[in-house]
Image (cartoon, grey):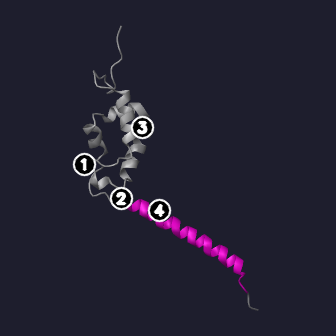
Amino acid sequence: MTTQIDPVLALIGAAWLAIALMLAVGALGYLYRLASAARPLPFLEDLQRRGVSAAQLEAAVGAGGFARALRRCALCAVREQCGGQRVACPNEALVAYVRRLAPAGPRGASGMKAAPTA
């Protein structure tokens, strides 16, 4: 007895195989970009250059927001061009937000602007 493979089922199987292959290639590319750092992340240097400390950033957005900012930096396509050059940073809006929250002036222990005293 010979068994015939249903053409519709073969097509569905091939489609699932193609989807799995695309997901695997995407995951490998993601891991490669994450692990192939030629130098440390320029994020903290960029923060200092813009006048924002890491403590200010964490106080403004929390540890989760800080971790997401580091992840955006690690996965940035133009990360190798950072450092003194003006490039489109994916954390630009976040840094501007933190700078608005903590204008220049006396700083408390947390790095944020000290609360006014009566």
Compare marks 4 and 1 and give the one earlier in the sequence: 4
> Compared to 23, does 98 lie above or below?
above
Q: Amino acid at mark 3?
A: Ala
Foreground residue, 83 or 3?
83
- For the residues labelled 2 and 4, the Cα–Cα distance comes to 12 Å
Residue to which mark 3 is pinned = 63
Which segment is the magenta one?
4-32
Labelled disc at residue 27 = 4
Q: Helix or strand or loop: what does disc 2 sit on?
A: helix
> Compared to 91, does 24 lie above or below?
below
Q: Amino acid at mark 4?
A: Ala
Q: Nearer the viewer, mark 4 or mark 1?
A: 1
Residue to which mark 2 is pinned = 35
- For the residues labelled 1 and 3, the Cα–Cα distance comes to 27 Å
Compare marks 1 and 3 and give the one earlier in the sequence: 3
Foreground residue, 34 or 51?
51
Q: Say if mark 4 contacts mark 3, CB within 8 Å.
A: no
Residue 118 lies in the magenta-colored region: no
Residue to which mark 1 is pinned = 85
Compare marks 2 and 3 and give the one earlier in the sequence: 2
- For the residues labelled 2 and 3, the Cα–Cα distance comes to 22 Å
